[in-house]
Amino acid sequence: MKQVIQDFKTGNLFVGDVPIPALTPGFVLVRNHYSLISAGTERSTVSTGKASLLGKARQRPDLVKQVLDTFRKEGFSETLKRVRTKLETLKELGYSSAGTVLATMDTTGTFKPGDSVACGGGGYAAHAGIVSVPQNLVVRISDSLPFDCAAFTTLGAIAMQGIRQASPRLGEFICVIGLGLLGQITAQILRANGCRVFGIDTAQKMVDIGKNTGCHCTLTRKDPKLETVIDSFTEGHGFDAVIITAAAQSNDPIELSTAILRKKGVMVVVGAVPMNIPREPHFYQKELEMKISCSYGPGRYDHSYEEEGHDYPYGYVRWTENRNMAAFTKLMEDKLIDVKPLITHVFDIEEAEKAYDIVTGKVQEHHIAILLKYPVTAEKIKAETPPAVLSGIDAVGIGFIGAGSFAQKFLIPCAGVHGELLSVATSRGITAKSAGEKFKFRAFTTDTGEIFSNKDIHAVFIATRHDTHAPLTLAALEAGKSVFVEKPLAILEEDLIRITEMCRRQSSCRLMVGFNRRFSPLAQCARESFRGIPEPLVINYRVNAGFIPKNHWIQTREGGGRILGEVCHFVDLLQFITDSNPRRVFAECVGSTNARTSNRDNVAITILFANGSVGTITYIACGDKLLSKERVEIFGGEKSFIINDFITGEVYSDGSTRKINTPGKGHREEVELFIKAVREGLPSPISRDSLFYTTATTFRILDALQTGLPQSIMIDP
């Protein structure tokens, strides 16, 4: 299918062929008929992509701060890898479209194939022939509403939310500052609501259009009669509310709003403007109120609502983003809103570059709403994968499922050195295309079944979100593939049991989990230092993990939480250094009442091993972010070994000390050893029992936190 793509590194924008996105639970697969280019938002996005590295830094100071923090903690080399991974990607554009449902896995039974729908959401309702959209970002539309009008639905929801923040009443005087696309829609909704609408813009052309569509009166910002006309329009009282839909570099929209509002009036900021509020004379003396409008409405940026499909109770949250979208489509269906006059251009998807030349100002041409139109010809939902031709008799054919930043930074480059990169599958076509072309895979797809059925693929790497690890691992093992799955192996105990049973039924299956730290040079050196010591070890492992908000996907059912998702790493390293399986575990977490934090992100864990060794893991999210992430202290046999963030080591023995400088966390080594095992028919670099014990231990840590009691650890024999 065709999709509008921007190379974020070079800024080049083009229309490319990408695989059709995968359909997953809670999502709806839609064939687009039209999508709307949001000129303001997308002009900014495209311009950022086209800027130089310095220009990108100036436009995104928040990302620069993240880069500097990474540099302080991890050094130049690791920071450079991260920056390159972020830059060398293809980006989708667009967030408002309309089309026909092809297939659905929505959990509410709302949609069926053939339904006409409007779609929203950046990264979902993109400028592409077929899109996969979360169910709460899709609304059904009647057959009477044309698709070109329905493509405005997301912009309409943004306008609706801004208006709801103002809470306008019948007959009130409302001013809209900024009569671009969003302002024009806002004015029409206000008029349909029975308000008296006044529009202001810097451009005479937009003022004229506003007068003909939604506003009762309009003027340009520099019109000398502005103050007099406003006074007459509001009968000398000032506006009840001002809604700012402009995008501006100056503080003028804010200052103007304070001057033209009545006493106790409301200012709502929807557009991107500076918000330096002058206290005197108006804001203070009039006791004005200022509100920010958050995009489409309640639910926006809530992972549980948008991605997981959990709705808010109707009686408590009347207007969610989905309900805002639906309300706007009803206004259009009832002919109370007419967006047709706002459409200035319609381009076929193949001509999208011409559309963006207008949006970015490369071609000087008046525009408001620009639509992209998609062909109605049928496309195959599933494409065939071309046969692979391996370069040598001993070559290991590799397939990747998932190609996020971690996989692109650590796994794929290493795998490409030691094997043949045959195919990569991701849920979104543009990600598959980006990774496939960047790393020179032979094929890319959104269908994981193509990875499993490809006889030339010997090893499957799984680097998806945590809740999919176990199901994909089971499917890959069932297909007879060797499997490298990133941690964690499973986030549900029943899935661990199923994997354990399968591996014991199929004794030849090869399974590896990405517990990389045991393969690091310093971990290898530490284990060698204590080899042969006939007494147990004591290990302190401090992890300054950093804060992650509760709405991050790692904290949701997709991620399983940080104990299952990350602490497994540290349990594995303790197993490796002690050369023993865990037998009992106890854990305590903090008892904070701070609603922002998860108590289980700050936890002290004690593990007793079969050989009598004891390990403690202090996992904290409340430490200073500039403190090194990991420090491992190992004691035994009158020796001590310290690992400082897997960069340097210190050995204390016989009254002397020795420093070791061998940085690395073992990513390259683990991939190399796994592929070697596949090639030579060797067992996995980590024994299956060790993998199972590590995962079982994380489940018992959660039990210990729940019960307040030590937990025995065992795996089914």
Image (spheres, rainbow, N blue to C red):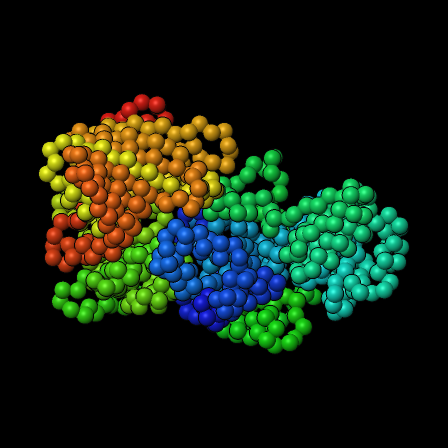
Q: Nearer the viewer, residue 164 or 673?
A: 673
* Residue furthest bottom in the image: 363
Is residue 254 visible in this depiction of the protein? yes
Residue 612 lies, with reference to residue 655, above or below; the image says above
Residue 41's spot in the image, x, y percent? 59, 61
Q: For residue 154, what is the image quadrant?
A: bottom right
Residue 343 lies, with reference to residue 170, above or below; the image says below
Q: Nearer the viewer, residue 609 or 18?
A: 609
Q: For residue 530, what is the image quadrant?
A: top left
In the visual, does 543 lie left or right of 713?
A: right
In the visual, does 716 lie left or right of 138?
A: left
Is residue 336 visible in this depiction of the protein? no
Residue 576 lies, with reference to residue 610, above or below; the image says below
Residue 8 lies, with reference to residue 171, above or below; the image says below
Q: Nearer the viewer, residue 450 or 538?
A: 538
In the visual, does 446 lie left or right of 144?
A: left
Identify the residue at horizontal 18%, vertical 70% (top origin): 391
Residue 182's spot in the image, x, y percent? 66, 58
**Number of numbered discs:** 0
Identify the residue at horizontal 51%, vertical 33% (top origin): 595
Quadrant showing the N terminus: bottom left
* Residue furthest front in the image: 655
Residue 524's spot in the image, x, y percent? 19, 47
Q: For residue 396, what is the image quadrant?
A: bottom left
